[in-house]
Every structure is written in structure tokens, then in C-alpha cells.
Image (cartoon, coloured by chain):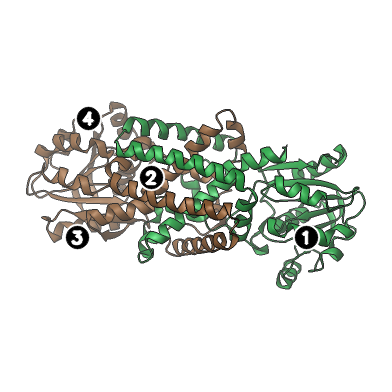
Chain colours: A brown, B green
């Protein structure tokens, strides 16, 4: 499919992409660039890539596809290093969780004959780093493409096929809509998980053992999400701050409403709300976006 | 261990207890009482119990151990039906998630020579009903006992051993402390999960398909908890309303704080909080209260 692919940033997502490319034989050569030489050494050792070096410019040279897989706060630095080595007619993409304020940043820094098509694979786990990746990460997950307006259809199709070969289903969405929808389905859930675990820790500083012991009552599910990459999520919330902030307001207004119903012992209202939320679970399982087994099938 | 055990309410928890008793051979006879005749028929059909009938008084007669496993709002009704049939020297327990305001209610309605020792097994799934139960539900989970002050040590030891044979670890806790700790580790997480799914549904009424499609970004974990039994949870929040309400206030204050940090692009503060919350996950896994595999090991 490609002669050479360069991945900038081999964390959970970047290293999973490299593994999937290799497994599915989608490129003759796979290289990566990481700031840390330990990571560059590690990904070569793990045989995830053919070559890896902190010299981003050198690594990217001659690539047909360059994938930025760093935290959002590194994008500016990365694109300044990349821009002079991007090959004529190549495709540039990323895997970031926010689009609106990065699309322009990249666009203004790249040559005209490079197709900049932003990607967002909706996949991940709570683990980080090159060792946590695996080639099946994208299977049966959605990947959203947000192409720059100037890009030709042929390259969009090519990148779409690339993600499909990784096992994903592909949607096209504009940046504004993407940032809104994802703030609901991903950003706010992560923020809420961080907040509940943090609230718990603040209250119980001297009783951590009680939290751990009785966490199976519900809290443990939140601690999984709240164990996600802190740097990545710090950047997501700041880069999508308008949507995040307005969604927090909605969330708090609804929570105040629930609080009032509890204080008034308004069982009917509580029951109505709790019954409504049950339905969506069934649809998520039916759509193959989660396993249907109780407790996620964990033992 | 017992000659006869009676379970009032064969839902997820009640039917799991019946299954575990049978599997581990802890009683010669197991009976249950359910309001619904369909459930009474079902549990006999499933061979979970030897007999089952809506006549609670009749079913409980002669039992050495009676377990109330109904929603909290039914306790008053159940205890009025039970009180005249409780056997001299028998043990009465329950599996409810709130203690302080039910301990007294039961105590004032039962004969003096019945040992009332409240239980709370910290276990469950998002499913409900007699068919969803399984005998391993309590394995490696904590069970908290809250004995009435009048109860003799021998009976506490007996009930403790009963839960240990079910596979649980046992703690003794007073009602006030129980309701406080559980509001943190269980009640508030459930309320927050209901609230985030409800907020999502309110915003996206016309875009349910987008929520479902992109739920793997984080939301799907919350939908699992928000699919839990609506009646049970309605009762929990109302019965523990003082703790719930004060914890909501803490949660909102912390969320407002996070919102401010996001609006001010205070990356340092966000990173600090997000790093702190990571630690607790490791301890929960180490304590055997969750699986250590990424994504709960789901495929």
C-alpha cells in the first residue's frame, strides 16, 4: 500500500499502528521518530519499526505517509521539524483527539502538494508507551477523518482504505462537529472519571485502604479510565476547552437536579431517569462497541 | 451449616446466594419468597431453590437463616410479614447497600431471640433478575457485617463463616461508617454514571447513533454502571441521602476547580491531578479488587 511510513511518537497508539501495518503488510518500510532515545532503542528492539531516531526530519524523508501520534502540545514543534522533509504528493495525518485548533496550525506550515488529512481512531486503553500497543487495537473501532479542504479525493480514499485495512470503520466529519461529538462521548467521561477519583482521594487521604477494599462497588470502573495518559488528556481538555467547559455546565446542572430529587425523596423522578439510561447500553453492545457480558466479562 | 435458609427476593444477589449455598452445600433446604409468581415459578424451574412462594411468612417458618434481598423500599413490608414466623435463635440478615436508617426499623419489629446482623456483600453486575445470578459472584469480594448491638458473638461468627464459605472476605463496620465509606466507593460512582449518561441523552436526543458509534472513547464504561437496577439505586440514594448530598457538593466543587484550570490553560495543575489518580488503580488491581488487564481484558 505504501513504500515507506513514518510514525512520529510511538506510544500506545503509534506503536499499535506500526504493529498493525507490519502484520497486515501495508508498507515495505516503517520508521519512527521519538524524542527519547530510550524509546527509539526500544521500538527497534521490539522489531516494531525498521528504524527509529530523534531526528524527525531525517526519519520522515521520502515517506508516503507520515503519522503524527504525539500529544497535541507537541504538534507545533513536530510540524516545524517535519515541514521541509515532507515528500511531494505524500499524505500527512495524525491521531489526535481534538481537531478544530490544530487543522489550521498544520495547514499553514506544510507544502501545498502534501495532503493533510487528520485522523482520529476511537480506540485506546488505560496504558501508555510503546510496549502497551497491539496490532488489534483498531479492529471494529471507528476512525474519523477530517480532511483539509484542499485535499484531493484520491488521497482521502487511500487513507480511508488504510484505516479499513487496520480493521476500522471510517467516517468523515468536519472539525467543529468532531470536537463537539467527541467531547460528549470521550472527553467529558474522562474528565468526570478523573474528578471522581480525585474527589475520593481528597476526602479519604487517610483511608486509602478502605477505598481500595470496597472499590468493587463501582469506583473501580472509574479508576481504569482515570489511569489514562495524563499528558495526553491534559492537552485534550485544553485544546477543546470551549466544548469541555460548556459540557461541564450541563453536567453540573443535571447533577444539581438529581440532588434535589434525592433530597425531596422524589423516587418517581429518579426511577424515570435511571430507566432511560439503561437503553443506551443495549445499543452500544448491539453495535459491537462493547462486549455484552456482565461486568465486561472480567473475572 | 444450616438446616433451612430462606431468601426473600431472588434477584441478581438473592439468586446468586441461593446458587452458592447449593454449590457449597451450606444448607439442607433453600427456599425463597418473591412477590411475583413468575419469579417463584422461575427459581423452582431453574432449580435454584427447593420451594418458593409469595407467602413470605410460610416460606420463612423454621428457617435458621433468613436473608432479605429486596430493594430497601420493601424492607418495612417484608419485616411486617416476617416477624411472626422468625424462629427462636435464628439469624436474620439482609444484603442492602445502606445501613443506618434500616437497622432500627428491623430491630424494633423482630422478636428478642432473633439475631439481626446486617450484611452487605460488595458485589454485583449491571444485570438484574434471578437468571442473572451465578454462584461465584462473591468470590474474592468483601462483605461488610453490621451487627445489632444485642447480638451474641457466636451468631456473628456463624454468619461471618457463612460469607467466608461463599468466597468472601469479611469486615465488621458500624452503620454510620458503612454508609459514609460506601457512598464514596459505590453510591456516588453510580450516581455520576447515571448523570453522565443522562446528560449525554439530553444533549443528543437526535444524535443517539453518534453516541453509540463513538462510545468506545470512554462513555461505554459509564453506560455499563448506568444500566444497573433502577429501583435498587433509587432506594439507595434516598436512604443514604445525607452522605450522597454532601458528596455531590464535594464533587461539584472539584469539577468547578478543574473547569477553571482548563479555562486558564493551567496544564501544570491538570497534569498534577491526573497523575495522582493513576496510582489508586494499581493498588486496586494489586488488592485483587479488579483485573489488571488493559480495558478489563475485554475483546
Quick one: SS at disc 3?
Answer: helix
The chain holding disc 4 is: A
Which sits in the foreground, B27 or A243? A243
Residue extending farthest to the front is A264
Mark whose residue sits in front, 1 or 2: 1
Say yes or no: labels 3 and 1 on the same chain.
no
Say yes or no: labels 1 and 2 on the same chain.
no
Say yes or no: labels 4 and 3 on the same chain.
yes
First along the sequence among labels 3 and 2? 2
First along the sequence among labels 4 and 3? 4
> Which class describes the residues within 10 Å of circle 1: few (<14), some (14-19), or many (20+)?
some
First along the sequence among labels 2 and 4? 4
Alpha carbons under labels 4 and 3: distance apart:
31 Å
Q: Can you give x and y, in whole percent of width and height, for residue A134 in the image?
A: 38, 45
Which sits in the foreground, A106 or B34? B34
Q: Which mark is residue A134?
A: 2
Residue at the spot of label 1: B78
Residue drawn at point x = 42 percent, y = 33 percent = B273
Residue at the spot of label 3: A157
> Which class describes the residues within 10 Å of circle 3: few (<14), some (14-19), or many (20+)?
few
Alpha carbons under labels 2 and 4: distance apart:
23 Å
Q: Which mark is residue A54?
A: 4
The chain holding disc 3 is: A
Q: Which mark is residue A88?
A: none
Q: How many marks?
A: 4
Q: Can you give x and y, in whole percent of width and height, for residue B241 in the image?
A: 61, 48
Residue drawn at point x = 58 percent, y = 42 percent = B185
Q: Can you give x and y, in whole percent of width and height, for residue B299 in the image?
A: 46, 53
Residue extending farthest to the right is B88
Q: Is residue B245 visible?
A: yes
Amino acid at each position: 500500500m505504501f513504500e515507506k511510513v513514518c510514525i512520529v511518537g510511538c506510544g500506545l497508539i503509534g506503536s499499535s499502528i506500526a504493529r498493525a501495518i507490519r502484520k497486515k503488510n501495508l508498507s515495505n518500510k516503517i520508521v519512527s521518530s521519538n524524542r527519547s532515545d530510550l524509546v527509539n532503542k526500544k521500538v527497534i528492539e521490539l522489531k516494531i519499526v525498521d528504524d527509529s531516531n530523534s531526528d524527525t526530519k531525517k526519519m520522515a524523508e521520502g515517506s508516503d505517509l507520515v503519522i503524527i501520534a504525539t500529544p497535541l502540545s507537541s504538534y507545533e514543534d513536530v510540524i516545524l521539524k517535519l515541514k521541509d522533509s515532507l515528500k511531494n504528493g505524500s499524505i500527512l495525518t495524525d491521531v489526535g483527539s481534538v481537531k478544530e485548533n490544530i487543522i489550521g496550525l498544520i495547514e499553514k506550515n506544510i507544502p501545498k502538494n502534501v495532503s493533510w488529512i487528520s485522523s482520529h481512531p476511537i480506540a485506546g486503553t488505560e496504558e501508555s508507551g510503546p510496549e502497551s500497543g497491539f496490532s488489534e487495537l483498531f479492529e471494529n473501532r471507528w476512525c474519523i477523518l477530517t480532511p483539509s479542504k484542499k485535499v484531493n479525493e484520491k488521497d482521502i480514499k487511500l487513507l480511508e482504505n488504510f484505516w479499513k485495512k487496520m480493521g476500522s470503520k471510517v467516517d468523515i466529519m468536519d472539525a467543529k462537529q468532531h470536537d463537539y461529538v467527541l467531547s460528549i462521548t470521550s472527553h467529558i467521561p474522562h474528565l468526570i472519571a478523573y474528578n471522581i477519583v480525585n474527589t475520593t482521594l481528597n476526602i479519604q487521604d487517610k483511608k486509602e485502604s478502605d477505598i481500595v477494599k470496597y472499590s468493587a462497588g463501582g469506583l473501580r470502573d472509574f479508576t481504569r479510565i482515570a489511569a489514562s495518559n495524563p499528558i495526553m488528556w491534559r492537552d485534550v481538555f485544553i485544546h477543546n476547552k470551549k466544548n469541555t467547559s460548556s459540557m461541564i455546565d450541563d453536567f453540573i446542572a443535571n447533577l444539581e437536579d438529581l440532588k434535589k430529587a434525592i433530597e425531596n425523596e422524589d423516587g418517581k423522578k429518579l426511577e424515570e431517569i435511571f430507566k432511560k439510561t439503561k437503553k443506551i447500553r443495549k445499543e452500544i453492545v448491539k453495535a459491537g462497541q462493547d462486549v455484552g457480558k456482565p461486568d465486561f466479562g472480567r473475572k
